Image: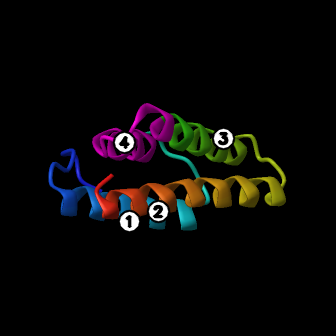
Amino acid sequence: MNDAAPSSWRGRRTALGTLRRRVAGQVSVGAAEGVEARRVLFSLGRPSADLHAALGALDDFERAILEHEDRVVIEARRLKCLAILDRMGGLEKKGN
């Protein structure tokens, strides 16, 4: 992902897709990636409830990795995070 927050619809959609792919394959947590992920989420301009849900799911997922939770717990949190990102992507596509 890049350092600048995407301003166009296409840029935000691309950044969200990149974030989704990163979460799908993520096995470790890095501070720089975490900051960039949150920057992408804030740049989407979604209502605060959507943003809160996405940030919470991302935090829970990353915390599970950091705390070496059971693999089942990590995967469940990953799937929840991906579902929220997918929902946000669908809303972004519709322009809501």
Magenta-drawn stretch contains 25 = no
**Mark 3 or mark 4, which has the lower sequence index?**
4
Task: Look at the image and tell me in which quarter the N terminus lies.
Answer: bottom left
**Mark 4 or mark 1, which has the lower sequence index?**
1
Q: Magenta span covers which residues?
A: 32-51
Left or right for 68, reference 2: right
Label 3 Cα crowd, 10 Å radius (few <14 / some 14-19 / many 20+): some
Give me the C-alpha separation between circle 1 and circle 2. 5 Å
Give me the residue at 20% from left, 58% from top.
Answer: 9
Give me the C-alpha separation between circle 2 and circle 3. 15 Å
Residue extending farthest left: 8
Please name the residue that numbered disc 3 is placed on: 60
Please name the residue that numbered disc 1 is placed on: 17
Please name the residue that numbered disc 2 is placed on: 20
Q: Are marks 1 and 2 in contact (CB under 8 Å)?
A: yes
Please name the residue that numbered disc 4 is placed on: 46
Q: Position of residue 14 (x, y in %)?
A: 28, 64
Give me the C-alpha separation between circle 4 and circle 1. 16 Å
